Image (cartoon, rainbow, N blue to C red):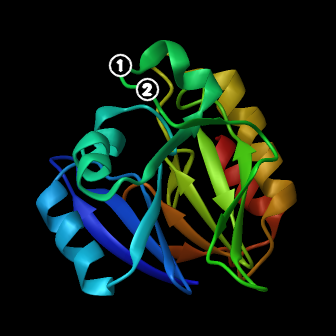
Amino acid sequence: MEIKRVIVGWLRTNCYLLSSGDELGIIDPGGDEGEILKEISKTGIKLKYIINTHYHPDHILANEEIKKKTGAKILIHQAEKEFINFEPDKFLKDGNEIRIGVGDSPSVLKIYHTPGHTKGSICLAGDNFIFTGDTLFKDGCGRTDLPGGSQKDIEESLEKLLKLLKPGTTCYPGHGEIFKIRTCLASLGRFLLF
Protein backbone atom coordinates (compact mmCIF):
# COMPACT_ATOMS: atom_id res chain seq x y z
CA MET A 1 0.00 0.00 0.00
CA GLU A 2 1.21 3.48 -0.87
CA ILE A 3 0.27 6.26 1.56
CA LYS A 4 0.26 9.98 0.78
CA ARG A 5 -0.58 12.68 3.30
CA VAL A 6 -2.43 15.86 2.32
CA ILE A 7 -2.87 18.48 5.06
CA VAL A 8 -6.31 20.09 4.79
CA GLY A 9 -8.70 22.54 6.43
CA TRP A 10 -8.46 25.21 9.07
CA LEU A 11 -7.22 22.79 11.75
CA ARG A 12 -4.56 21.27 9.45
CA THR A 13 -6.03 17.78 9.46
CA ASN A 14 -3.99 14.92 8.04
CA CYS A 15 -5.96 13.41 5.15
CA TYR A 16 -4.42 10.21 3.80
CA LEU A 17 -4.69 8.74 0.32
CA LEU A 18 -4.17 4.97 0.29
CA SER A 19 -3.50 3.24 -3.02
CA SER A 20 -3.25 -0.49 -3.56
CA GLY A 21 -3.26 -1.90 -7.06
CA ASP A 22 -6.11 -0.32 -8.97
CA GLU A 23 -8.09 0.98 -5.98
CA LEU A 24 -7.82 4.02 -3.75
CA GLY A 25 -9.17 4.95 -0.33
CA ILE A 26 -8.98 8.18 1.62
CA ILE A 27 -9.07 8.76 5.35
CA ASP A 28 -10.46 11.96 6.90
CA PRO A 29 -11.10 14.42 4.05
CA GLY A 30 -11.61 17.36 6.39
CA GLY A 31 -11.77 20.20 3.87
CA ASP A 32 -10.08 21.56 0.75
CA GLU A 33 -11.97 19.11 -1.46
CA GLY A 34 -10.46 20.70 -4.59
CA GLU A 35 -6.96 19.87 -3.40
CA ILE A 36 -7.97 16.32 -2.44
CA LEU A 37 -9.71 15.73 -5.78
CA LYS A 38 -6.60 16.98 -7.58
CA GLU A 39 -4.45 14.48 -5.66
CA ILE A 40 -6.94 11.69 -6.42
CA SER A 41 -6.83 12.61 -10.10
CA LYS A 42 -3.02 12.46 -10.11
CA THR A 43 -3.11 8.81 -9.09
CA GLY A 44 -5.26 7.80 -12.04
CA ILE A 45 -6.95 5.29 -9.71
CA LYS A 46 -10.65 4.99 -8.91
CA LEU A 47 -11.60 6.06 -5.38
CA LYS A 48 -13.44 3.24 -3.60
CA TYR A 49 -13.81 4.43 0.00
CA ILE A 50 -13.99 7.61 2.06
CA ILE A 51 -13.19 6.52 5.63
CA ASN A 52 -13.79 8.74 8.65
CA THR A 53 -11.95 8.08 11.92
CA HIS A 54 -14.64 10.11 13.73
CA TYR A 55 -17.43 12.63 13.15
CA HIS A 56 -15.76 16.01 13.86
CA PRO A 57 -16.11 18.51 10.97
CA ASP A 58 -12.35 18.83 10.47
CA HIS A 59 -12.34 15.13 9.49
CA ILE A 60 -15.54 14.88 7.38
CA LEU A 61 -16.12 18.28 5.77
CA ALA A 62 -15.26 17.22 2.19
CA ASN A 63 -17.03 13.81 2.39
CA GLU A 64 -20.12 14.61 0.37
CA GLU A 65 -18.46 16.70 -2.33
CA ILE A 66 -15.86 13.98 -2.94
CA LYS A 67 -18.57 11.31 -2.97
CA LYS A 68 -20.57 13.35 -5.49
CA LYS A 69 -17.56 13.65 -7.81
CA THR A 70 -16.23 10.08 -7.45
CA GLY A 71 -19.06 7.80 -6.34
CA ALA A 72 -16.93 6.51 -3.45
CA LYS A 73 -18.61 4.95 -0.40
CA ILE A 74 -18.52 6.79 2.94
CA LEU A 75 -17.64 4.65 5.99
CA ILE A 76 -17.85 5.69 9.66
CA HIS A 77 -18.31 3.84 12.96
CA GLN A 78 -21.89 3.09 13.99
CA ALA A 79 -21.49 4.88 17.35
CA GLU A 80 -21.25 8.21 15.48
CA LYS A 81 -24.81 7.84 14.11
CA GLU A 82 -26.37 10.32 16.55
CA PHE A 83 -23.74 12.98 15.77
CA ILE A 84 -23.74 13.06 11.94
CA ASN A 85 -26.05 14.80 9.49
CA PHE A 86 -25.23 12.64 6.45
CA GLU A 87 -26.08 9.08 5.46
CA PRO A 88 -22.97 6.89 5.22
CA ASP A 89 -22.91 3.93 2.89
CA LYS A 90 -21.77 1.65 5.68
CA PHE A 91 -21.47 1.83 9.44
CA LEU A 92 -18.30 0.18 10.76
CA LYS A 93 -17.88 -2.01 13.84
CA ASP A 94 -14.88 -3.16 15.85
CA GLY A 95 -13.13 -5.98 14.01
CA ASN A 96 -14.41 -5.09 10.52
CA GLU A 97 -11.87 -5.20 7.70
CA ILE A 98 -11.63 -2.81 4.76
CA ARG A 99 -9.99 -4.22 1.63
CA ILE A 100 -8.40 -1.91 -0.91
CA GLY A 101 -7.15 -3.44 -4.15
CA VAL A 102 -8.39 -6.41 -6.14
CA GLY A 103 -6.77 -9.71 -6.95
CA ASP A 104 -4.86 -12.11 -4.74
CA SER A 105 -3.23 -9.59 -2.42
CA PRO A 106 -5.42 -6.60 -1.52
CA SER A 107 -4.32 -4.33 1.30
CA VAL A 108 -6.38 -4.91 4.44
CA LEU A 109 -7.15 -2.39 7.17
CA LYS A 110 -8.56 -3.77 10.42
CA ILE A 111 -10.94 -1.53 12.39
CA TYR A 112 -10.32 -0.99 16.10
CA HIS A 113 -13.04 0.91 17.95
CA THR A 114 -11.18 3.37 20.20
CA PRO A 115 -13.79 5.61 21.88
CA GLY A 116 -12.84 8.54 24.07
CA HIS A 117 -12.23 11.44 21.71
CA THR A 118 -15.71 10.63 20.37
CA LYS A 119 -18.04 7.68 20.91
CA GLY A 120 -17.21 6.19 17.52
CA SER A 121 -13.53 6.99 17.13
CA ILE A 122 -11.62 4.29 15.28
CA CYS A 123 -8.07 3.34 14.41
CA LEU A 124 -7.26 1.42 11.23
CA ALA A 125 -4.34 -1.02 11.38
CA GLY A 126 -2.41 -2.47 8.47
CA ASP A 127 0.85 -4.35 8.21
CA ASN A 128 3.17 -2.54 10.68
CA PHE A 129 1.27 0.78 10.45
CA ILE A 130 -1.85 2.31 11.97
CA PHE A 131 -4.05 5.35 11.32
CA THR A 132 -4.96 6.70 14.75
CA GLY A 133 -7.26 9.66 13.97
CA ASP A 134 -7.47 11.87 17.05
CA THR A 135 -7.04 8.99 19.50
CA LEU A 136 -3.23 9.06 19.52
CA PHE A 137 -0.74 11.76 18.53
CA LYS A 138 3.05 11.85 18.76
CA ASP A 139 2.90 13.77 22.05
CA GLY A 140 -0.34 12.58 23.60
CA CYS A 141 -3.97 11.81 22.94
CA GLY A 142 -7.11 13.58 21.75
CA ARG A 143 -9.26 15.86 23.88
CA THR A 144 -12.29 14.38 25.62
CA ASP A 145 -14.38 17.46 26.49
CA LEU A 146 -16.52 17.61 23.31
CA PRO A 147 -19.86 15.81 22.77
CA GLY A 148 -19.34 12.05 22.88
CA GLY A 149 -15.94 12.38 24.55
CA SER A 150 -14.88 10.48 27.68
CA GLN A 151 -11.60 10.50 29.60
CA LYS A 152 -12.30 7.01 30.97
CA ASP A 153 -12.98 5.67 27.48
CA ILE A 154 -9.86 7.19 25.95
CA GLU A 155 -7.70 5.70 28.70
CA GLU A 156 -9.20 2.28 27.98
CA SER A 157 -8.68 2.79 24.25
CA LEU A 158 -5.04 3.71 24.79
CA GLU A 159 -4.57 0.54 26.84
CA LYS A 160 -6.07 -1.39 23.92
CA LEU A 161 -3.60 0.26 21.54
CA LEU A 162 -0.68 -0.46 23.86
CA LYS A 163 -1.37 -4.17 23.47
CA LEU A 164 -1.60 -3.81 19.71
CA LEU A 165 1.30 -1.50 18.86
CA LYS A 166 4.81 -2.91 18.58
CA PRO A 167 8.10 -1.00 18.39
CA GLY A 168 8.63 0.05 14.79
CA THR A 169 4.93 0.53 14.04
CA THR A 170 4.38 3.70 11.98
CA CYS A 171 1.54 5.86 13.34
CA TYR A 172 -0.41 8.15 11.05
CA PRO A 173 -2.32 10.55 13.35
CA GLY A 174 -5.19 12.89 12.52
CA HIS A 175 -3.01 15.96 13.19
CA GLY A 176 0.72 16.59 13.53
CA GLU A 177 3.72 14.49 12.68
CA ILE A 178 3.79 10.91 11.46
CA PHE A 179 5.88 8.91 13.93
CA LYS A 180 7.15 5.45 14.82
CA ILE A 181 6.66 3.64 18.10
CA ARG A 182 10.20 3.49 19.50
CA THR A 183 9.81 2.97 23.23
CA CYS A 184 8.59 0.01 25.22
CA LEU A 185 4.83 -0.02 25.52
CA ALA A 186 4.75 0.29 29.30
CA SER A 187 6.72 3.54 29.15
CA LEU A 188 4.54 4.84 26.33
CA GLY A 189 1.44 4.00 28.35
CA ARG A 190 2.63 5.91 31.40
CA PHE A 191 3.48 8.89 29.21
CA LEU A 192 0.16 8.88 27.41
CA LEU A 193 -2.05 8.39 30.40
CA PHE A 194 -0.50 11.05 32.60
Q: Pointers 2 and 1 in contact (CB under 8 A)?
A: no
Separation of marks 2 and 1 at Cα, in angstroms: 7 Å
Apparent side of residue 166 relative to residue 48 in the rendered image (left or right): right
Query: Residue 38, how many percent across, how many down?
Result: 17, 73
Of 179 and 71, which appears nearest the observer? 71
Label 1: few (<14), some or many (≥20) within 10 Å?
A: few
| Mark 2 residue element | loop
Of 82 and 173, which appears nearest the observer? 82
Q: In this rendering, is residue 10 above or below 87?
A: below
Q: In this rendering, is residue 159 above or below 39?
A: above
Query: Residue 155, how many percent across, how many down?
Result: 71, 34
Residue receiving disc 2:
87
Which quadrant holds residue 41?
A: bottom left
Apparent side of residue 94 relative to residue 54 in the rendered image (left or right): right
Query: Residue 84, how many percent across, how many down?
Result: 41, 21
- Residue at (35% x, 44% y) in the render: 59
| Mark 1 residue element | loop
Q: In this rendering, is residue 124 above or below 193?
A: below
Residue receiving disc 1:
85
Of 167 and 192, which appears nearest the observer? 167
Mark 2 belongs to which amino acid? Glu
- Residue at (80% x, 55% y) in the render: 162
